[in-house]
Image: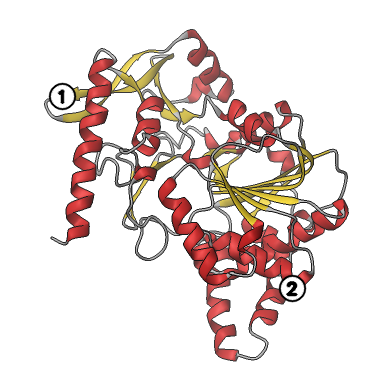
């Protein structure tokens, strides 16, 4: 076992002990929403507090910016369109991962002559913040002064664009189970030395919300289990409130509500990532694995509306990138290198194909005090499905 493996094992042991203490302190039953929150974000113990590599080939999962610079280039073209309409502005990225998306966007905006006044990164993980800073200083030393890190949303209003790539799926979710026409809330208990699922009668609020999630509740089979994000509305409002004028772009894997809660999706959408292996078990590799759930984009649209934003577009990642002419970005990036073009073409397939990321991932745009068409949404409009 390597020194890195030893450190990971120790981190997991401490994280596991911390969560067990929290379950015991709660009387032996802890809501899954709270369990997920602690497993991911507890200071010193959570997944995002650990020092292990999380993204890319050496991490636990791969995001679109890790696959190809083409993703960031296309996002930059959409941002340039918005910044041009605003005549200037700033960018705010929520949860910047490795920093690759920020770098790719800044590189492409520089070629467009549309660099933002400021590129802010809202990052709660101190470890990721340092990794992002090191990466950007190495790749873009001449632009690093434009990049600023925040641990909370900006205090002052700004105009520009807010970006959130694969952030919504990591918001803690509550789980419920359909039980003989009633709703149970699924939480976490301890049996021996192991975490287990444990049900209790849902609160009136959870029962109401669960019943509202689908008009097909009477068609759910016994034991149907799913999830929803109780904090979505408050979180969206808090991170978008500083935007006085501009756009918000959400990127994530998910579905409209009518497709999310279909009877055949009886086990919910909980997904855990550990060293590029996926499972639905959140009780293993505590502190070392990412825990996510697919995004109910209808809920995102509702939360955005409640935050005073106007829904301006909803489409698949494939159609978003095609609308921004990803083929042109390939030609520009590989103008003098045909071997690079072949590599970019392979990367583009991963971003675009239905069996890869093209259909699973969606893009939503919301505007505030701005009325303009967005090129990323011109090929396919899925707002009617929400």
Q: Nearer the viewer, residue 169 or 137?
A: 137
Position of residue 380 measured from the top left corner of the image (x, y, whole percent): 74, 54
Q: Classify the position of the N terminus by image quarter.
A: bottom left
The residue pinned by badge 1 equals: 191
- Answer yes or no: is residue 98 visible: no
Q: Nearer the viewer, residue 297 or 101?
A: 101
Q: Which mark is residue 111?
A: 2
Colour convention = secondary structure
Position of residue 224 measured from the top left corner of the image (x, y, whole percent): 40, 27
- Answer yes or no: is residue 176 visible: yes
Vertical order, 157 against 222 (above or below): below
> Which residue reaches farthest top?
204
Q: Nearer the viewer, residue 226 or 142?
A: 142
Which residue is depicted at the point 49% across and 16% down?
Answer: 206
Q: Which quarter of the figure has residue 26?
A: top left
Whether residue 283 sits left or right of residue 319 in the image: it is: left
Which residue is depicted at the point 66% across and 38% down?
Answer: 154
Whether residue 12 sits left or right of residue 86 in the image: it is: left
């Amino acid at each position: 076992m390597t020194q890195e493996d030893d450190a990971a094992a120790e981190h997991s042991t401490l994280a596991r002990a911390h969560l067990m203490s929290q379950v015991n302190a709660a009387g032996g039953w802890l809501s899954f929403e709270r369990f997920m929150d602690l497993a991911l974000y507890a200071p010193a113990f959570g997944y995002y507090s650990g020092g292990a590599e999380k993204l890319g080939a050496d991490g636990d999962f791969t995001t679109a910016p890790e696959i190809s610079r083409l993703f960031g280039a296309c996002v930059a073209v959409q941002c340039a369109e918005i910044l041009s309409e605003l005549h200037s502005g700033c960018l705010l990225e929520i949860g910047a991962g490795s920093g690759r998306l920020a770098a790719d966007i800044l590189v492409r905006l520089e070629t467009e002559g549309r660099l933002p006044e400021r590129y802010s990164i809202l990052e709660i993980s101190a470890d990721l913040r340092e990794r992002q800073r090191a990466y950007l200083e190495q790749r873009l030393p001449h632009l690093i002064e434009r990049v600023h890190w925040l641990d909370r949303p900006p205090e002052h209003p700004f105009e520009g664009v807010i970006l959130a790539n694969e952030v919504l799926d990591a918001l803690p979710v509550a789980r419920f189970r359909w039980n003989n026409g009633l709703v149970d809330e699924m939480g976490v208990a301890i049996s021996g030395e192991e975490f287990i699922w444990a049900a209790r009668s849902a609160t009136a609020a959870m029962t109401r919300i669960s019943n509202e999630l689908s008009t097909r509740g009477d068609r759910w089979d016994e034991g149907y289990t799913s999830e929803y994000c109780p904090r979505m509305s408050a979180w969206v409002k808090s991170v978008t409130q500083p935007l006085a004028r501009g756009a918000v772009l959400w990127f994530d894997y998910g579905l409209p509500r009518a497709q999310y809660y279909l009877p055949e999706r009886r086990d919910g959408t909980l997904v855990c990532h550990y060293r590029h292996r996926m499972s639905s078990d959140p009780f293993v590799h505590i502190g070392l694995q990412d825990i996510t759930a697919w995004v109910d984009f209808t809920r995102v649209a509702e939360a955005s509306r409640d935050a005073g934003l106007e829904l301006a577009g909803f489409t698949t990642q494939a159609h978003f990138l095609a609308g921004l002419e990803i083929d042109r970005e390939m030609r520009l990036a590989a103008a003098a290198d045909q071997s690079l073009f072949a590599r970019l073409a392979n990367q583009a397939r991963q971003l675009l194909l239905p069996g890869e990321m093209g259909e699973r991932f969606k893009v939503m745009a919301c505007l505030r005090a701005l009325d303009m068409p967005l090129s990323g949404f011109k090929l396919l409009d899925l707002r009617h499905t929400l």
